[in-house]
Image (spheres, rainbow, N blue to C red):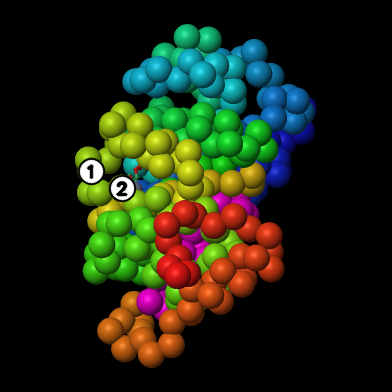
Amino acid sequence: MKNILNAPFVVEMCETTANMYRLGWDERNGGNISCLLDQSELEQYLNVNDVIRTIPTGFDAAELAGKIFIVTGTGKYFKNVQKDPETNLGIVRISKDGKNAELLWGFKDGGKFTSEFPAHMMSHIVRLKQDPEHRVVAHSHPTYTIAMNTVCSTDEKDFTHKLWQSNTECVIVFPDGVGVLPCMVCGTEEIGIATAKKMEKHRLVVWTNHGIYGTGKNLDEAFGLIETVEKTAQIYMLALGRAVNVIPDQIIKGLADLWNLTVMEGVLDLE
Ligand code: 13P
Ligand code: ZN
């Protein structure tokens, strides 16, 4: 067996959590990440028949039965993942009935997966239907995104438009726009269901007064989506109330056409 601490999926989880912490997005235990693993790759590092313990999922995850995820632990600090991955991360397989997660590695101190496990798993279910290559759900608390969401309406077309108008990269990186949920109690099945519903149309979902979710085929893509929103939210907040030049809708459309992208409906006014 190869050393799991050198496995690309462990190394990338360490690097991504460290980057998010370094950028100031994930204070204390803020943020969580889950990544769908390929069983044949995992078998180079672990005997997948050895279940350390089972942890109730708390909801029906049967649609993901047999799927294996690496996921951050609840209450764990992104700051600490790199120096102790085996305590701060876990690898779990969803049981046949979807009621349990079978721990295959990690959560060494008796810990468990993130409190946002329902939102992650329900988002994986929806995104896999949109894109079979989907693998990652990442949640973070980036400062300017939350600030922009504090001063803007929760209308997702309006929020998306403001981002597209502030940085030419935005419509190219997320032509599908950003879904926005109102302020809700986090860590619940309810917010998981609401998040997953938004994921039918968007790879990015803002939780008002809380943070953002990004998804993708790999950690780079999920991270890059959040990074692009956060950078643009910073531009928006720095220019707040003083913007003279915003990107005209014709230019946003021109960018989308150039890259053959289908943009979120009802955002651009091209009359
Ligand atoms: P966890 O520590 O349970 O992952 O929660 C952090 C968080 O960001 C809640 O939304
Ligand atoms: Zn959070």
Q: In terms of secondary structure, where does tag 1 sit? A: loop
**Could you classify mark 1 by the number of other residues whose Cα lies within 10 Å: few (under 14), some (14-19), or many (20 or more)?**
some
Q: Are marks 1 and 2 in contact (CB under 8 Å)?
A: yes
Name the element at disc 2. Answer: strand
Residue 79, relative to residue 248: is it above or below?
above
**Residue 104, relative to residue 243: is it above or below?**
above
Residue matched to label 2: 181
Instruction: Report x, y in % for residue 62.
Output: 48, 15
Q: Main secondary structure of the magenta part?
A: helix
Label 2 lies in ligand 2 vicinity (Cβ under 8 Å): no
Task: Identify the magenta region.
Answer: 219-236
* Viewer-closest of 237 and 87: 237
Eye-nearest disc, 1 or 2: 2
Residue projecting furthest to the top: 97
Q: Report how far apart the C-alphas of labels 1 and 2 lie in the structure.
A: 8 Å
- Quarter placement of the N terminus: top right
* Residue at x 46%, y 30% (from the top left corner): 121
Displayed quadrant of residue 24: bottom left
Percent across and percent down for residue 234 are 40, 75
Residue at the (25%, 62%) spot, across then down: 153
User: Could you tell me residue 196's position as x and y percent?
Assistant: 42, 36
Residue type highlighted by circle 2: Leu
Residue marked by disc 1: 184
- Which quadrant of the figure shows ligand 1? top left
Q: Is residue 265 above or below residue 270?
A: above
Residue 254 painted magenta: no
Q: Tell me, yes or no, if residue 100 can be seen here.
A: no
